[in-house]
Amino acid sequence: MITITDLDNNPVEIEEGLIALVAGPYSNDVHPHTYIYATRPFLTVTTESPDALVARLGKVPPMATLTRPNNTPVWIDGHFSTSVTNPVKGVYPASVKAVIYLGNLGPFFQQAVKETVATASAAINAAGGNI
C-alpha cells in the first residue's frame, strides 16, 4: 500500500498494483496537481510531483513514460493497456500520434500521446503490456 495525500490534505491508501496511470497537471490547473488513475479509488489528485510519486511506487517493470499532447509526461502501467491505435483525425490535435486504451479503468478510458503507435506500443510492452 502507498499513502498519498489528496488535495484536501487527507491520506488516501492505494494498492500500488491498482495504479494504472499517473499524469501531471493539465494546462488549466491553477496549482501543480498530479492525477492518479487506479481501479480503486478511480481518481486521486495530489500536489506531490508526478515523477516523485512514480519513483515511490517502485513498480517492476517500471511504468512507461510517454508524452501527453500538452508536452507533459504521463506514466502508464502496461498491464492495464488493452490497445494502442492511431488517433481519429479531427478528434485529437495534430501532435497526437497514438491513443492508448486502458480497459481496466472503464471501456472508454484513453490517453492520447505524441509518440507513434510503434513507439508507444514498445514502451507499453516494456512496462508489462501485451499489445
Image (cartoon, rainbow, N blue to C red):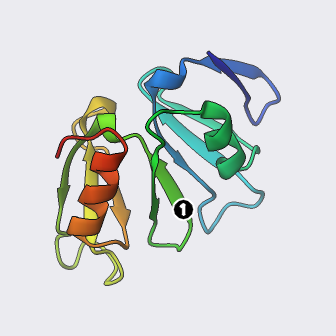
In screen coordinates, is 44 left or right of 95? right
> Going 54% across and 62% down the picture, which residue do you hit?
73
Does any portion of residue 73 appear in the rendered image?
yes
Task: Give the residue drawn at x 25%, y 48%.
Answer: 101
Which residue reaches farthest right?
Answer: 9
Q: Position of residue 18 (x, y in %)?
A: 45, 24
Residue 28 in which image quadrant? bottom right
According to the picture, the residue beneath numbered tag 1 turns out to be 73
Q: Is residue 33 above or below residue 7?
A: below
Residue 33 lies, with reference to residue 118, above or below; the image says: above
Q: In the rendered picture of this protein, how many numbered marks are placed on residues?
A: 1
Q: Is residue 110 visible?
A: no
Q: Please tell me which residue is depicted at 49% across the width and 50% down the height of the picture.
A: 75
Quarter of the picture holding the N terminus: top right
Q: Position of residue 99 (x, y in %)?
A: 26, 61
Q: Residues within 10 Å of mark 1 (few under 14, many from 20)?
A: some
Identity, as a three-letter code, of the amino acid under mark 1: Pro
**Residue 114 percent across, percent down from the top left:** 37, 73
The location of residue 57, given as percent across then percent down, is 61, 32
Horizontally, is 79 left or right of 20 in the view? left
Residue 66 in the image: above or below residue 131: below
Q: Is residue 44 left or right of residue 130?
A: right
Say which element carries label 1. strand
Q: Quadrant of residue 58?
A: top right
Q: Residue at x 30, y 62 (%)?
A: 120
Q: Is residue 93 left or right of residue 51?
A: left
